[in-house]
Image (spheres, helix red, strand yellow):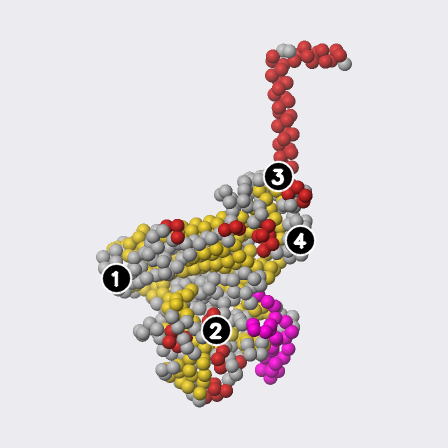
């Protein structure tokens, strides 16, 4: 042994041998560390390509050492499961039961963040009876984010609905069924086996109704004997406006509309007020077609006439009971990924104000005629760096998502919005035109690669995406179709100077729009907004007037270029001299109708196309518009 050591020492004293020895030793150490790091990466669920969490089982530290939080290289993860307990440590094997409790635990972790904190939510339905609120204490810190995410390969549903069971036959001759609902229940939508049911309603444009000073006369004197006449609503359309007013009383043939709804419906004192009856809705006596329903609030009973093949003893029937699923106030660096938000409602239109539209989902409320938006089922006010990605918003009774009150740097990317009573998204405010404090302005938001369809299901005046005063809104590479009014409407004030500017609507595919009301277009702008660009969009099949390019009163300093406008009433609608200093150039259209009565607008280089023979440049716009390849899968995302 001594001889061996002597030989090693002898060789090691040689400089060349010593250098080789160092190389070999460090190579062996590097190989060992590499294998150890790879093993940790696989255990922790870290993507080897980009270092992000893939969501596989995380490294869970000892509960005594770190409160049971899963710690992964500076990042932390918590877990929620419908089968968990809030008394658990929130690990993958012992998850919490509620998102609200996970949020509360995050508040104890985020003061000195060195990486993102992720809350993984396992599949299942999480019923929200009390709004899930987020404020500044729930924010990501030090440039990192708090991320709420469905567990990989699973989808969690955040729901405001309640299942209705215990159905029995109410009228065998008419095949009407009934079920009890909790005392005091009020809801304006009902979903049967995942599909929106139709509230009981009469025929369209019924004959014999005449407007009076307090409502209408009816040719059907039996209406005075209907049950709960105060819950019956008279509905009217007028161009871009929708009116839904409850009845106060019916005497013989005289229908008196409740106040202040009736006065508010006449408030604009012009031709575009509540002049005629489109249909009557929400009466038990109108429950005559399969798939219709009626809520009797006086007896806490809901009635439904099932479709052929529906068995109410086994069907899933859900009523929305919660209005706001998530509310964020002054929160920042917060993200939601791969959830389904569903079954929230909005009941204000059932009160004495009803629903009397002015424009774009804003309506008069109360005797002071306050303008209010369709309430958001998810809302963020004064918040920043908020991201929604890969989610489904469906079966909602208000606006899907609202950002206002000076919200900034929000991102809505790769989501699906379907079957919503109001707009998909509403941005900004309509009463802050003079806001000069940049920190309090609504600005720098992105709506990108989203799939939007069948929104405005109850409130037909709502644009699919609406923005009031806003600076730097980008609406890019979305697909919006089958909507009752405008796919996109931006602006307010009818010419009032504001901070609105730098907005862009680009590379979108909008089709089958303006299907119910009138006076709309693929993109509707209102008011001056410097450096706003509408470009490289493909718009097809605008059902009612007007068409594609519609800068309304006071719109100025905008550019509309390289868009394709196909099968509409008018490709260009500039109807008033107050529309000024806009550029409309290099667009393609196959509907020659247009109106151009503005001031100092440049309309040039636009190409009329006949026989469906589109130039190569136009075809390229058509081919590249819409959702990008990376996000196309959201179109097939399942609904709740």
Q: Earlier along the polypeptide chain: callout 4 or callout 1? A: 4
Q: Residue at x 65, y 70 (%)?
A: 314
**Mark 2 lies on residue:** 350
Mark 1 and mark 3 lie on one chain; the one further toward the N terminus is 3
Residue at the spot x=62%, y=50% of the render?
Answer: 79
Q: Residue at 35% of width from left, 67% of height from top?
A: 519
- Residue 432 image point, x, y percent: 36, 58
Mark 2 and mark 3: span between their CA atoms?
A: 55 Å
Q: Answer yes or no: do the residues labelled 4 and 1 have beta carbons within 8 Å?
A: no
Q: Secondary structure at mark 1?
A: loop
Q: Tell me if 264 is positioned left or right of 4 in this view.
A: left
Residue 583 appears in the rendering: yes
Q: CA distance from mark 4 to mark 2?
A: 41 Å
Farthest residue toward the left? Answer: 600
Residue of label 1: 578
* For marks 2 and 3 on the same chain, the one whose residue lies earlier in the sequence: 3
Q: Is residue 564 above or below residue 221?
A: above
Q: State which tag comes first along the sequence, 2 or 1.
A: 2
Look at the numbered disc 4 and give the secondary structure of its residue. Answer: loop
Task: Determine which of the numbered discs, if any, sits on residue 87 in the image.
Answer: 4
Which of disc 3 and disc 4 is earlier in sequence?
A: 3
Q: Secondary structure at mark 2?
A: helix
Q: Residues within 10 Å of mark 4 (few under 14, many from 20)?
A: few
Q: Which residues are magenta?
A: 161-185
| Image mark for residue 41 | 3
Within the image, what quadrant is residue 163 found in?
bottom right
């Amino acid at each position: 042994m001594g001889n061996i050591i002597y030989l090693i020492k002898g060789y090691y004293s040689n400089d060349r041998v010593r250098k080789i020895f160092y190389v070999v030793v460090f190579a062996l150490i590097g190989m060992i560390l590499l294998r150890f790091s790879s093993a940790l990466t696989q255990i922790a669920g870290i993507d080897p390509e980009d270092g992000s969490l893939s969501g596989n089982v995380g490294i869970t530290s000892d509960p005594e050492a770190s409160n049971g939080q899963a710690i992964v290289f500076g990042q932390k993860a918590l877990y929620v499961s419908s089968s968990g307990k809030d008394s658990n440590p929130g690990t993958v094997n012992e998850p919490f039961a509620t998102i609200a409790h996970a949020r509360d635990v995050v508040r104890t972790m985020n003061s000195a963040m060195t990486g993102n904190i992720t809350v993984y939510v396992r599949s299942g339905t999480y019923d929200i009876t009390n709004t899930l609120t987020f404020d500044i204490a729930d924010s990501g810190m030090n440039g990192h984010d708090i991320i709420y995410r469905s567990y990989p390969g699973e989808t969690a549903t955040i729901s405001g609905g309640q299942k209705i069971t215990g159905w029995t036959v109410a009228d065998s001759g008419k095949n009407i069924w009934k079920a009890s609902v909790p005392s005091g229940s009020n809801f304006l939508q009902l979903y049967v086996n995942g599909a929106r049911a139709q509230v009981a309603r009469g025929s369209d444009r019924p004959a014999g109704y005449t407007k009076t000073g307090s409502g209408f006369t009816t040719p059907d004197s039996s209406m005075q004997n209907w049950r709960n006449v105060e819950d019956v609503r008279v509905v009217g359309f007028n161009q871009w406006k929708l009116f839904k007013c409850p009845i106060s009383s019916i005497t013989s043939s005289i229908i008196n509309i409740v106040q202040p709804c009736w006065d508010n419906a006449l408030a604009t004192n012009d031709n575009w007020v509540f002049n005629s009856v489109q249909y009557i809705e929400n009466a038990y006596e109108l429950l005559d077609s399969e798939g219709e329903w009626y809520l009797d609030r006086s007896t806490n009973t809901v009635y439904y006439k099932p479709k052929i093949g529906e068995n109410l003893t086994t069907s899933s029937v859900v009523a929305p009971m919660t209005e706001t699923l998530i509310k964020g106030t002054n929160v920042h660096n917060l993200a939601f990924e791969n959830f389904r938000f569903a079954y929230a409602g909005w009941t204000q239109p059932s009160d004495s104000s009803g629903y009397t539209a002015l424009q774009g989902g804003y309506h008069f409320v109360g005797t002071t005629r306050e303008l209010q938006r369709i309430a958001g089922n998810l809302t963020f006010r004064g918040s920043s760096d908020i991201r929604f990605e890969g989610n489904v918003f469906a079966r909602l009774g208000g606006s899907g998502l609202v950002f206002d009150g000076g919200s900034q740097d929000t991102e809505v990317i790769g989501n699906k919005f379907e079957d919503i009573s109001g707009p998909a998204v509403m941005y900004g405010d309509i009463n802050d035109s003079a806001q000069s404090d940049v920190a309090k302005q609504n600005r720098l938001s992105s709506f990108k690669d989203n799939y939007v369809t069948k929104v405005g299901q109850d409130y037909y005046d709502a644009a699919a995406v609406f923005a009031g005063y806003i600076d730097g809104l980008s609406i890019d590479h979305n697909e919006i179709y089958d909507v009752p009014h405008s796919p996109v409407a931006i602006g307010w004030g009818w010419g009032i100077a504001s901070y609105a500017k730098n907005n862009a609507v680009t590379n979108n595919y909008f089709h089958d729009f303006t299907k119910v009301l009138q006076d709309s277009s693929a993109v509707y702008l209102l008011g001056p907004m410097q450096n706003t660009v509408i470009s490289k969009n493909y718009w097809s099949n605008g059902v009612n007037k007007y068409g594609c390019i519609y800068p309304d009163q006071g719109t100025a300093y905008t550019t509309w270029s390289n868009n394709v406008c196909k099968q509409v009433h008018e490709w260009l609608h500039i109807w008033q001299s107050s529309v000024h200093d806009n550029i409309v150039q290099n667009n393609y259209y196959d509907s020659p109708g247009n109106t151009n009565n503005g001031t100092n607008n440049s309309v040039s280089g636009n190409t009329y196309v006949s026989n469906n023979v589109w130039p190569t440049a136009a075809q390229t716009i058509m081919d590249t518009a819409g959702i990008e390849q990376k996000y196309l899968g959201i179109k097939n995302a399942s609904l709740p």
